[in-house]
Image (cartoon, helix red, strand yellow):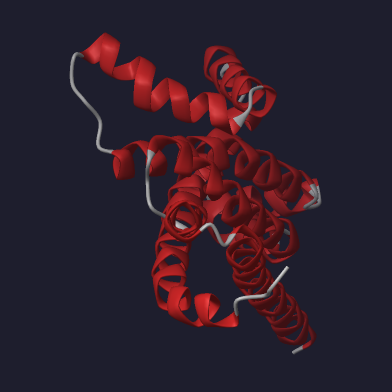
């Protein structure tokens, strides 16, 4: 088997464009997932039973079903109900955000519950409301503790975003498939795709390590 290095050189710019789309999907999905997850985690900790039940059902359903099935539900099944076709980009972001939100909710919930209950009591004794205590005392402390698992969620979503290729969205994996369909250079292209994913995940890991060290240093001061 002859290794075609020129094919990698020719294809690299197109694969980098796909990698940019992958990062965009991941950033938007985890960003929306953070918002969803924060509110869902608070709902799960709420004493309002219907709200807590709905939040628990959402988390259990999303974590108990594959992301691929969720993408199919959003892109193929939902238009049957609404009668409106969904753009692949919107479907990809929606499915990935809903998926990420469930996992982020559990990360936030664990982080909040790791804070000593005395912190909430201290805030309330100072005249702060439950919301103010959560916003200014509990969540800032919890956020420092959940940086590593949030980093892991970002990396997981970066890799799982390859599943949106099944609806024809041209992120990194789909770009690789299209190039292989034209050139038949499976080994060279998939090796390059794997290398690009490795670079992205390694970079995120180092960034998470830096943030974790930074917050630990700030705590000492």
Q: Is residue 60 left or right of residue 171?
A: right
Nearer the observer, 55 or 128: 55
In the rendered structure, the answer to whether residue 81 lies left or right of residue 1 reads left
* Quarter location, residue 40: top right
Q: Quadrant of the N terminus?
A: bottom right
Percent of width and height locating residue 220: 80, 86
Judge whether residue 9 can be spotted in this image: yes
Q: Residue at x 75, y 80 (%)?
A: 219
Q: Quadrant of the C terminus?
A: bottom right
Residue depicted at x 62% and y 61%: 190
- Residue 147 is left or right of residue 196, and the answer is right
Q: Is residue 126 visible?
A: no
> In percent of the image, x 65 and y 61: which residue is there?
143
To which quarter of the image does residue 43 belong?
Answer: top right
The total of numbered circles placed on residues is 0
Residue drawn where x is 65% and y is 59% of the image: 155
* Residue 172 x/y as whole percent: 48, 59
Q: Position of residue 117 (x, y in %)?
A: 78, 46
90 w.r.t. 12: above or below? above
Q: Is residue 125 above or below residue 17?
A: above
Q: Is residue 68 left or right of residue 108?
A: left
Residue 165 percent across, percent down from the top left: 46, 44
Residue closer to the observer: 17 or 52: 17
Q: Residue furthest left?
A: 84
91 relative to 210, above or below: above
Quadrant of residue 77 within the rendered picture: top left
In front here: 102 or 50?
A: 102
């Amino acid at each position: 088997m002859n290794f075609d290095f020129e094919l990698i050189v020719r294809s690299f710019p197109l694969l980098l464009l796909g990698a940019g789309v992958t990062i965009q999907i991941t950033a938007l999905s985890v960003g929306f997932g953070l918002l969803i997850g924060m509110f869902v985690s608070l709902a799960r900790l709420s004493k309002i039973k219907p709200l807590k039940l709905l939040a628990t059902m959402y988390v259990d359903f999303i974590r108990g079903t594959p992301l691929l099935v969720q993408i199919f539900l959003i892109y193929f099944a939902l238009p049957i109900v609404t009668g409106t076709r969904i753009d692949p980009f919107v479907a990809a972001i929606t499915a990935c955000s809903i998926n990420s939100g469930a996992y982020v909710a559990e990360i936030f919930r664990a982080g909040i519950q790791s804070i000593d209950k005395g912190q909430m009591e201290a805030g309330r004794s100072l005249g702060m409301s439950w919301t103010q205590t959560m916003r200014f005392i509990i969540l800032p402390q919890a956020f420092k503790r959940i940086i590593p698992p949030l980093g892991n969620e970002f990396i997981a979503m970066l890799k799982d975003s390859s599943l949106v290729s099944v609806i024809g969205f041209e992120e990194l994996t789909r770009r690789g498939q299209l190039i292989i369909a034209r050139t038949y250079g499976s080994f060279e292209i998939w090796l390059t795709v794997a290398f690009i994913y490795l670079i992205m995940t390694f970079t995120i890991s180092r960034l998470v390590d830096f943030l974790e060290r930074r917050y630990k240093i700030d705590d000492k001061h």
